[in-house]
Image (tube, helix red, strand yellow):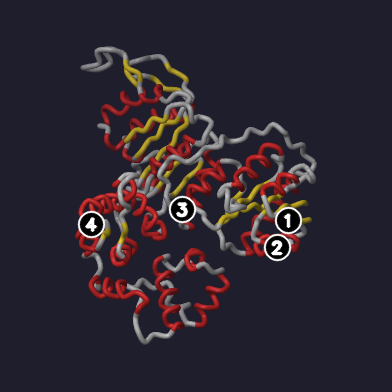
């Protein structure tokens, strides 16, 4: 039961080591990637906690430690720690072999939870021989817009990273505009099929009488207008991935044929008597409640069971408000290009963006930012935003004036300013204390003490037009 803790911060390193020691681990500490790699073969490590940023010169040394330990110590469970975490970081870490990804500040309970889970795994494998030739998922450098730092989105990306290296069918659920196809592409690009085709099909956009021919192909003369044999999209995706968006929009008759394709790996072109075996991974998506669709008789239960070996639910933007600002900045930079002067957002505009509910989610936010960038003069102000964003707040004018005033109000004590700021952050995170503590740069215990001091425990979950 040997554990290694790697962090250049003495306090964090010693605190993690102390918790692990109390859990029965024999702990060794290292303050750099070089020192960690020197210890690589000294002991049979079962657990490694490693910071991502181990020096000012290199922001990703922790990934090199992860790669070396994964290659040469496959029995070790690696946990990456970071104070600059993101959803893409979580996805890449887990897809590259990390057991978990912790964003600072994290809780003692997080360390204990991981320690106990790894201990149970060791006990379960006790006496079994672990192969030195376990297949490792490919290391992939992100090139997809998976922007986010919220706890909710980071947890989703961890699951994406874990499922990517398998061949299991995946069902992605979430409201329209939450990025289901982007996540499907992320799964494909982090799988062993990354060099093979990724074929996306919007089932809701295809007429019921054409979807079978579009997906499975047809032979000449099978229907009016079928002048030549035609390969379907399923065959185009052979050895790759097919993404079925809006899969619950398909007809019951087509669902029967889709079930056979998923279950047996066989398709039959329209008008043909011969079947073809194809190796295709299926990722499906829906913005509906699939279980309710089954109960209402619109979707086959057996097909749902085949498609949702793993279900990934993407939270709507209103449940991950911490991601709105980085998303808005990303869309603004992408709109103006790399060489143009940067676009800034005024305090009032940011408040409106972060407090609007975004029923169209990321797609609606992108459209709003693109419009605002086109209209603004280097600084996005409330008047540059769409009218429905500006008019969605009952107390908009008071809120904007309060936001503009900020913390410059005269006559307020430092304690009152702190109280108001904490309440603002809690409102923005929907009452999520862990997320609020990370934004404030304090640990959760300190935040709890401040909540009790300012009597905010009861008001933290309220939805206010603007924190007063």
Classify mark 2: residues with Cα within 10 Å, few (<14), some (14-19) or many (20+): some
| Residue 418, horizontal then vertical, whole percent | 45, 78
Q: Is residue 412 above or below residue 108?
A: below
Disc 1 marks which residue?
29
* Residues under numbered marks 3 and 4 in contact, where contact means CB atoms less than 8 Å apart: no
Q: Nearer the viewer, residue 271 or 201?
A: 201
- Residue 2 versus residue 383 in the image, above or below: above
Mark 1–mark 2 Cα distance, whole angstroms, equals 8 Å
The local secondary structure at tag 1 comes to strand
Which residue carries the number 3 mark? Answer: 153
Which-is-in-front pick, marks 3 and 4?
4
Within 10 Å of the Cα at label 3, are there few (<14), some (14-19), or many (20+) other Cα atoms? many
Residue 111 spot, x, y in % from top left: 65, 59
Mark 4 to mark 1 CA distance (whole Å) = 52 Å
The reply to whether discs 1 and 2 touch (Cβ–Cβ < 8 Å) is yes
Label at residue 64: none
Q: Are marks 4 and 1 in contact (CB under 8 Å)?
A: no
In the picture, the disc for residue 14 is 2
Residue 138 figure quarter: top right
For label 4, the residue is: 377
**CB atoms of marks 3 and 1 within 8 Å:** no
Which one is earlier in the sequence, the residue at label 1 or at label 2?
2
Choose mark 2 or mark 4, whichever is in front.
4
Residue 244 in the image: x percent, y percent? 38, 35
Q: Position of residue 336 (x, y in %)?
A: 29, 47
Identify the mark nearer the N-term, 3 or 1: 1
Which residue is rendered at x = 65% and y = 48% of the image? 78
Gap in Å between the C-alphas at discs 3 and 2? 29 Å
Nearest to the eye among marks 4 and 1: give it. 4
**Extreme residue toward the bottom, this view:** 411
Nearer to us: label 3 or label 1: 1
């Amino acid at each position: 039961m040997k554990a290694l803790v790697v962090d250049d911060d003495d306090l964090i390193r010693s605190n993690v080591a102390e918790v692990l020691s109390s859990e029965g681990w024999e702990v060794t500490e290292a303050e750099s990637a070089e020192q960690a790699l020197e210890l690589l073969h000294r002991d049979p490590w079962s657990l490694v906690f490693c910071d991502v940023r181990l020096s000012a010169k290199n922001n990703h040394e922790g990934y090199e430690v992860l790669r070396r330990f994964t290659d040469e110590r496959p029995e070790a469970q690696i946990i990456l720690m970071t104070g600059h975490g993101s959803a893409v970081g979580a996805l890449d870490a887990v897809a590259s072999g990390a057991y978990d990804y912790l964003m600072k500040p994290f809780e003692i309970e997080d360390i204990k939870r991981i320690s106990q889970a790894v201990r149970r795994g060791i006990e379960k494998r006790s006496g079994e021989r672990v192969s030195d030739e376990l297949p490792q998922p490919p290391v992939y450098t992100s090139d997809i817009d998976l922007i986010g730092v919220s706890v909710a989105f980071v947890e989703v990306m961890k699951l994406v990273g874990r499922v990517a290296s398998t061949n299991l069918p995946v069902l992605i659920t979430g409201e329209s505009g939450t990025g289901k196809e982007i996540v499907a592409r992320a799964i494909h690009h982090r799988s062993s099929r990354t060099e093979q085709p990724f074929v996306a099909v919007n089932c809701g956009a295809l007429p019921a009488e054409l979807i079978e021919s579009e997906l499975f192909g047809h032979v000449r003369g099978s229907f009016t207008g079928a002048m030549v044999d035609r390969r379907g999209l399923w065959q185009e995706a052979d050895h790759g991935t097919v993404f079925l968006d809006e899969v619950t929009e398909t007809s019951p008759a087509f669902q029967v044929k889709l079930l056979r394709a998923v279950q047996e790996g066989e398709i039959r072109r329209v008008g043909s008597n011969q079947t073809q075996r194809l190796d295709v991974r299926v990722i499906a998506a829906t913005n509906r409640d699939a279980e309710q669709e089954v109960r209402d008789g619109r979707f086959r239960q057996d097909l749902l069971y085949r498609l949702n070996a793993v279900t990934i639910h993407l939270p709507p933007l209103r449940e991950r408000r911490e991601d709105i600002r980085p998303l808005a900045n990303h869309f603004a930079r992408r709109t103006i290009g790399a060489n143009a002067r940067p676009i800034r957002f005024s305090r009032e505009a940011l408040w409106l963006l972060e407090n609007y509910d975004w029923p169209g989610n990321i797609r609606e936010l992108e459209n709003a930012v693109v419009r605002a960038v086109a209209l603004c003069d280097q600084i996005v102000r409330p008047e540059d935003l769409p009218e429905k964003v500006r008019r969605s707040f009952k107390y908009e004018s008071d809120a904007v004036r309060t936001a503009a005033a900020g913390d410059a109000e005269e006559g307020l004590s430092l304690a009152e300013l702190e109280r108001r700021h904490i309440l603002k952050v809690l409102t923005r995170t929907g009452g999520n204390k862990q997320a609020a503590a990370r934004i404030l740069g304090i640990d959760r215990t300190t935040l709890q003490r401040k909540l009790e001091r300012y009597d905010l425990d009861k008001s933290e979950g309220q939805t206010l037009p603007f924190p007063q």
